[in-house]
Image (cartoon, grey):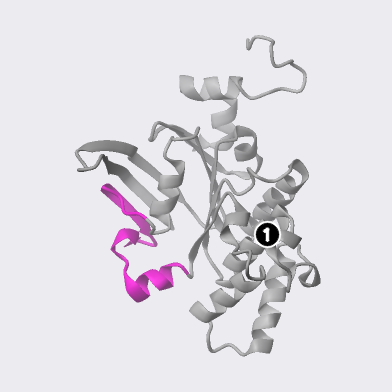
Amino acid sequence: MLRLDQVSKTFRLGAFGNRELTAVKDVSLSVDPGEVVSLIGESGSGKTTIGRMVLGLASPTKGRVTFDGVQVSGLRGRALHGYHRRVQGVFQDPFSTFNPVFKADRVFALVRDGFFGSVPAAQWRQRVETALHGVRLEPADVLDKYPHQLSGGQLQRMLIARALLLDIRLLVADEIISMLDASTRVDVLNLLGELKSSGLGVLFVTHDLALGTYISDRTVILRAGEVVEAGPTETVFTNPSHEYTRNLLAAVPHLHRRWDEPVK
C-alpha cells in the first residue's frame, strides 16, 4: 500500500537559500492494510516532514513515496483530490484545526462540499452520525456545538470521523494524542486499534515510546532524519540493536523508580 524508498528531504535556508538543512535522509518504510506502523523520534527528527510527504503536502528531494505503486509527489489536480479520498491526516492540536467562529461540525460540511456534493442532506446526516458512532461519539453531544464547547478528545475524534467519511485506507496520525489527558489517550489508541482491525493502515507518528508500543505492529526509530532501527515492535522494544534505541528505552520513566535514581 504505502511505500517510502530512500526518501530524503532538504530545505534551503537563509535569505538567498545558500544554506541547506537535511530534515530526512534515505528513509525507507512501508505500511500495509490493517497495520499500524509507529514512527518514533524526538523533536526535530523528521517525523512530521515524513508525514507531510506521505500526505502530498511536501515533495521529497530524493527518493519515492508511492501509494499502490503510484508516486504521490507527481499527483496534481483531480488525481491529488482522489488521493486524499484514500489518505488523510490528523494532527497534534485539534483546537488549531477548528475555526472558533464556526460550529465544529462544519468540518463535515466541508467534506461533503468537496467530495459528496450530490449526496442528499438527509443521507449525509446519516453518514455523519454513523461516522461519529464509529469513533464513540454521540451525535447529540457534538453536533451543532462550537469548538470551545467540546473537549480536546471530542474534537480529535471528530477529526478521525471526518477522515472515515471519506472511506480512507491510510491514516497519518501525527502526535494525535500528545495534547490529550491520559484517559482520553487510551480511548483514542483503542479506537485506532479497532480501525486497524477493520483494515485501515495507520502511520502513527509520536515521540512517546510507551504510546508507540501500545498498538503498533512495526516500529521505525528515527534520529536526526535517519532510520536507526526498524522491525517488529516487540523485537525493537525487547531486544533493540542500536545504542540510540537502548538509550531511549532507558530514559522512559518507571513507576517503581524515582526520577533522580540512576538508570542501570
Vertical side of 4 occupied by 213: above or below: above
Viewer can see residue 129: yes
Residue 222: image quadrant is: top left
Query: Would residue 4 appear left or right of 93 to someone viewing this image?
Result: left
Residue appearing at x 66%, y 63% in the figure: 158
Residue 192 vs residue 237, the one in the foreground: 192
Residue appearing at x 76%, y 23% in the figure: 255
Residue appearing at x 73%, y 43% in the figure: 181
Q: Name the spot of residue 197 as percent of width and height, x first.
A: 64, 57
Vertical side of 21 occupied by 135: above or below: below
Viewer can see residue 241: no
Range shown magenta = 58-84
Q: Name the spot of residue 93 as percent of width and height, x first.
A: 59, 51
Q: Is residue 80 magenta?
A: yes
Q: Secondary structure at mark 1?
A: helix
Residue 180 vs residue 17, the one in the foreground: 17
Circle 1 residue: 155
Residue appearing at x 64%, y 59% in the figure: 195
Query: Would residue 35 appear left or right of 47 to someone viewing this image?
Result: right
